[in-house]
Each structure stands twice: as C-alpha cells, then as structure tokens.
Image: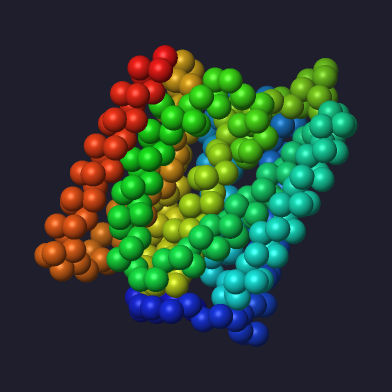
C-alpha cells in the first residue's frame, strides 16, 4: 500500500491478508456511522436551522470522504472493482424503487440509497483511474475537469437538466437531509433535503483518491483539502438560494492540486504542450458558451 511519503508507480493487483482485515473493519464502521447519522438527522428536534445546516453538511461530507478514502486504499483486480461497482448499483436501484413506494420509510431508506450510490460511484472512479498510466497525467486531468464541469453546470447539459429534469438530477445525486424534517406531523413523509452532490463528484473523488494511493501522492491531505473546499461550496450555495447550482468537481480538483503541489515533475517541453492544450480547451469551451447562448 502506498503512503504519502513513497512513490509506487504500479498498483498491486490483489488485497493482502494483513491489509484486508483492518480496511474491512474501517469500511464497516464508516458505513454504519454514515447510515446512522443520515438516518438520525431528520429526527433531531430543537436545533437552530443554521446550526443544523452546519452540522449536517460537515457530517455528510466527512463521512462520505472517509468511505471513498477507504475504498481507494483497497488493492483489487479490475474484475473485482467492476463487481463492487455493479452490485451496489443494482442494490441502489432496488432500494430506490422501495423508497418511492413507501414514503413514510424514506428517512430510513434514503441513507441506504445514498450509501449504495456512494460506493458504486467510488468503485466506478477506481475503474476510470486504471486509464491513468503515470502520475503526471493527473495534473492536466484535474485542470480540464475544472473547466469542463463549470461549463456543463452553468451552460451545458447539467445546467439544462437542473432546469428541465430536476427529478432526474435528484435521483442521480446523494441528498443531504434537512435536520428535523421528519420530526413533524407528516413524519417520514416530510423528509426534505437541503442540498445534494451529483454522481460525477463522487466518481472523481474515487478517481483522485485511488490515484493518490497508487502513485504515492498525499491522500490524507487531499481528503482534508477536498473536505474544506466542498464545505465552503455547499455552504455558499445554501447562503445564495437564487443560484441554481454550484459545481463541486472544480473544488475537488483544486483541493487535489493544492494538496499535491510539488509532486509532479514536467520537462520544459511537456509544460509547453500542457499550456497549449489548456488554451485549446479554453477556446473550445468559449465557443461552446457562445453557441449555447445563441441557441437560447
């Protein structure tokens, strides 16, 4: 297993016996804590809304990141990663059907939906990370993700989906439950959410975390930077109700870059090629913005 000090260029294909037991216990504890906290938040009474929002946001993000970090540290074969992506995804689909049918049970079903969806996204991110053959590829990927996600949310398909198909976006997101929303007269049917994070955010959290583990980058520092910046983004969104949505992926990518400053080594020619590539992508996105506005 790679740590923040050493560099491991190639992932080990299998889980060793000495690593699997503590990681398994950590995964079980994190999963149960995640479910318990998200199930309890809607039933908490007497908490001021501002305090409840802060507590819910910090708990939700910290536990989500802890689960993704644990998943990133497993050493698995690609086939194992595929099944660990597919099974939770199928279970998530079944649980969402049950939750849609029994509204009163939503406060207990919704956390399970979120946990299964989170695990599926994290393992899908692991699968995507197998396309990366060296750590230097991660820097341009992070920068491109920042530019592309801003475009898709404010101008492109994600923004359109938020306007025209909010229910679909909600189903493909992990909701942050509102504190006390199920403690009223309506009971579980009154469950409400104060925000949500999309599937792309957790897919690329898994992608960056496993890349850190495989290539000896700063995994724990990346987690804390991502936690801090995502918290600021979500709280900023909640403080600005007129904003249709805030892309979290740029904050995740920036957190990864800040946490791993100085860990990449490019030659002068590679830096030139990167600069040219970034300018080219920026031009394409600018043209895309102009075209989307002209269509309106």
Q: Is residue 208 above or below residue 108?
A: below
Q: Position of residue 111 (x, y in %)?
A: 72, 43
At horizontal 70% and vertical 58% (from top left) the residue drawn is 86
Q: Is residue 139 above or below residue 162?
A: below
Of the pair 105 and 173, the residue shown nearer to us: 173
At horizontal 63% and vertical 50% (from top left) the residue drawn is 118
Of the pair 151 and 84, the residue shown nearer to us: 151
In the image: residue 60, left or right of residue 152: right
Of the pair 189 and 145, the residue shown nearer to us: 145
Q: Is residue 274 above or below residue 246?
A: below
Of the pair 185 and 46, the residue shown nearer to us: 185
The reply to whether residue 182 is in sight is: yes
Q: Position of residue 220 (x, y in %)?
A: 43, 62
At horizontal 26% and vertical 59% (from top left) the residue drawn is 261
Q: Position of residue 99 (x, y in %)?
A: 82, 36
Q: Is residue 266 above or below residue 113?
A: below
Q: Position of residue 93 (x, y in %)?
A: 77, 45
Looking at this view, name the residue that lies furthest to the bottom.
17
At horizontal 75% and vertical 47% (from top left) the residue drawn is 92
Quarter of the view holding residue 257: bottom left
Dividing the image into 4 quarters, which one contains the C terminus?
top left
The reply to whether residue 22 is in sight is: no
């Amino acid at each position: 297993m790679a740590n923040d000090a050493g560099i491991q260029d190639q992932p080990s294909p299998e889980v060793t016996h000495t690593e699997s037991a503590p990681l398994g216990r950590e995964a079980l504890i994190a999963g149960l804590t995640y479910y318990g906290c998200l199930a309890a938040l809607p039933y908490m009474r007497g908490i001021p809304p501002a305090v409840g929002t802060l507590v819910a946001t910090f708990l939700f993000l910290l536990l989500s990141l802890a689960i993704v970090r644990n998943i990133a540290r497993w050493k698995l074969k690609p086939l194992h990663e595929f099944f660990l992506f597919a099974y939770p995804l199928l279970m998530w689909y079944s649980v969402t059907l049950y939750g849609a049918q029994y509204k009163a049970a939503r406060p207990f079903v919704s956390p399970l939906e979120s946990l299964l969806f989170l695990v599926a996204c994290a393992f899908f991110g692991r699968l995507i990370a197998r396309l990366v053959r060296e750590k230097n590829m991660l820097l341009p990927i992070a920068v491109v993700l920042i530019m592309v996600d801003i475009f898709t949310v404010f101008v492109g398909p994600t923004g359109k989906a938020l306007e025209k198909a909010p229910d679909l976006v909600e189903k493909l997101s992990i909701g942050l439950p509102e504190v006390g929303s199920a403690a009223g007269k309506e009971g579980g049917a009154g469950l409400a959410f104060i925000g949500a994070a999309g599937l792309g955010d957790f897919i690329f959290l898994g992608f960056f975390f496993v890349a850190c583990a495989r290539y000896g980058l700063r995994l724990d520092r990346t987690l804390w930077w991502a936690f801090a910046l995502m918290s600021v983004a979500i709280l900023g969104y909640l403080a600005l109700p007129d904003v249709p949505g805030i892309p979290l992926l740029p904050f995740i990518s920036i957190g990864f870059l800040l946490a791993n400053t100085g860990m990449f080594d490019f030659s002068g020619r590679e830096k030139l090629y990167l600069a040219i590539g970034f300018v080219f992508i920026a031009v394409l996105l600018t043209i895309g913005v102009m075209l989307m506005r002209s269509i309106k």
